[in-house]
Amino acid sequence: MLRVSWVLSLALCAPAFAAEPGAVVREEVGNRVSENVPAVPAELLERLERYQNTRGASFVGWLPEGGLLVGTRFGETNQIHRVMAPMGMREQLTFQREPVAGAVVAPPEAPAPGFVYGRDVGGNEFWQLYWFDLETRASTLLTDGKRSQNSRALWSRDGGQLAWNSTARNGTDYDIWVRTPDGKSRAVVTEGGQWVPMDFSPDASRLLVMKVASINEAYPGEVDLATGKLRMFPVDGGKAAFSAFKYAPDGKSVYYVSDEQSQFRMLRRHDPAAGAPQVVSKDVPWDVDALEFSPDGKHLAYVSNEDGISKLRVVTVDGHREVPLPALPIGVIGNLGFSPGGNQLALTLNGATSPSDVYVVDLAKATLTRWTASEVGGLDASRFRAPTLVRYETFDQVDGKPRTIPAFYYKPEGAGPFPVVINIHGGPESQSFPTFNPSVQFMLDELKVAVLVPNVRGSSGYGKDYLQLDNGMLREDSVRDIGALLDWIAKQPELDKDRVGVMGGSYGGYMVLASMVHYNDRIRAGIDVVGISDFGTFLKNTESYRRDLRRAEYGDERVPEMAAFHARIAPLNNAGRITKPLFVAQGLNDPRVPWTEAEQIVKAVRANQGDVWYLLFKDEGHGFRKKTNTDYFGAASMLFWQQHLLDGRP
C-alpha cells in the first residue's frame, strides 16, 4: 500500500509525527514511513544494486558428523545453513521471517542432534529461544514466548543441560535459568541485576556466572547446581572488567579474561591450590577478546585485538606452549570453535576488502582451509580499498604530549580534493574495526567520497583509562575529538574541508547531532540512525532492563546535577544551532533508543526551519536487519550525500 500526504503535525503521543510549521511530504509504503525523502533515481538504484547484493557468512558451530553450521542471508534475513565440506553447498535450515541469531550447537553427546537459536519480532529484542531438531527439522519454543529477553544460551559438555539468562521474572533483572534433560526449566540465580552464565564444569555440577555492572565492572562467581548455593570470587583491586570465564579441562582451575591491575584485558589462569593467578597473555599488550578450549582438553585458543586487527594464538593447556599456525589474512576474527575431535579450529574472518567468511585451521598440519566464499555482487573485488590507520592530535595531553585519536582512513583513488564522511560508532564503548562495508566501497569508488572512522575517547580496545574518558560529566570531550578531526581534515590537501558530513548510529547518532550543534559551520550535513537526542528522555524511556547499565556510562539522571548536565548538552535543547541538512532514521520497535528520541529531534529542528529527512521502519528496532529496509535506507543515504556533499552531482 502506498500513501502520500501533506501533514502538518507529528504528535509524540503515538508513532505519528510532531507538530511543525509548514507542510511535510509523508509517504507510507508497507512498513516504511518517510517524510521529505525524495524518490531515489533509477540510475542511482542501478549503480547500488551490486553493492547491495554482497553477503557474508559467519561460523555458528560444528556438527557431530564433521560439517559446519553457518549464518548467512540468501533472502530477506540472516538464517542458519549447513555446509558439509569446504566450499560446499550452503543448505538453508531455518526459514524465519525474522533474523535468526545467537545459535549454539548441541554437543555430540546430546540426546538429539540440533541447535538452540534466538529470534525476536520486528527488532523488539524480546528474544525467545528455540530448539531446532536436525532430524525432524522442527523448531520448539523453549522460553516463555512473552515480553522477556532470553539470551546467552550455553550447553553443558554432555549436552544434558542448557543455561541462559532471562528477564522473565520481572522484566528488569537478568536471572540465570537452567533447563535439564527432563525438559524442566528453573532459575538458579535471582539475585537482581544483570547475570550471565559463563561455563558448566566438566561434570555439569557447577556453573560459572558473572554479574555485570558495566563494561568496566563485573563480578565472577560459581553456582552449585545441586544446592543452589552461589559463591562469589574475589576481584583483585576490588573492581575490574571481565569477559571470558571458563573451567580448565580438569575442572579444578579456571581461565578468564580481566583487566585487574592492568590497562588491558589479559588472559589469566587461576588454580586455587597453586596460589596467585598466572597471566597467560603477559607478552600481549592488548585486550584479549575470545577464549576457547578444544574438547580433548589439549589446546586453548585466544584472540587479541591489536589496534583493531585480530591476532589468533593457540597454546597447549599443559605448559602454555604456542602452537605453530598458518598465516591468516589480515582482518577481524570472531566465533571461534574447535571441532569435536579437537584437531581443527573454525573461525569467522572479516577483512576490509572481503566480506565475512568461514575458515578452518588444521592444528597438526598448520594449514588454513576456506569453507565459504561469500558473494560480492559481481563486483571487481580488486577495486575494493583498504583503509590506513592514522592518529590525529586532540585537545588534551597524556604525559605532557598531545593525546592522539586513532582513525581508519579510507581514501578514494585519485588526487582529490575529496568530500569526507566521518562515520562514528555507537556503544559508546564499542570500537570501529576495518571490516568490509559495501556502502563505504560505493562511496569510495562511485561517489569519490573519503571516509574517516575514528575511535574517539570512550572506545574500547585502547585500555581502561581511555574507555572511561567520556563517562558522566566528561561526555562532550568525545565531541571535542570530532572537532579535532575536523582540524586534521583541514590540513590534508587531498580532502575538502568545506564538504564534510557526519553519520553514526545509536550513541554515534548522538555524536552526529552533538557535532552538528558544536560545529555547525564546519559540517555540511549529517545522518543520525537510532540516535539519542536527550540523555534525560533516553534514560526515562529505554527498556528497564537496560537502564542501570546505561546510567553507569551516561550518569544517573535522578541526581539533580547530572539531570541539569544532561539538559544542557542535549542536542534536543540546542536544536536551533543545527541549520544544516539532517537525515534521521529510526526503527519503531527499538527497545534501546526509543523512536521518541528520533521524532523529538525531527520536530525541534523543523521548528527552526531546518531541512530534515525522516525515515521510520515499523518492523525494525535498533538498526535495520531486513534486506528490503537496509537497501532502501542505503539508497536514500547515498542520495542524501549526493545532494548535500556533492552538490547534486551523480
Image: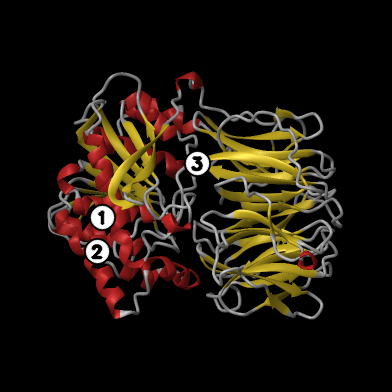
Q: Residues within 10 Å of mark 1 (few under 14, many from 20)?
A: many
Callouts 2 and 1 close, C-beta under 8 Å: yes
Amino acid of disc 1: Ala
Label 2 vs label 3, nearer the camera = 3
Residue 236 point in image, percent of width and height: 60, 68
Q: CA distance from mark 2 to mark 3?
A: 30 Å
Foreground pick, 326 / 194? 326
Left or right: 414 in relation to 182: left
294 vs 569: above or below: above
Residue 435 point in image, percent of width and height: 49, 37
- Render colour scheme: secondary structure
Residue in the picture at 21% in, 60% down: 603
Q: Quadrant of the C terminus?
A: top left
Q: Which residue is mark 1?
A: 514
Q: Which residue is mark 3?
A: 308
Amino acid of disc 2: Ile
Chain-order first, disc 2 or disc 1: 1
Could one spot residue 173 in this view of the protein?
Answer: yes
Residue in the picture at 31% in, 18% down: 414
Foreground pick, 550 / 607? 550
Residue in the picture at 81% in, 52% down: 107
Q: Which residue is mark 2?
A: 569
* Res. 87 image quadrant: top right
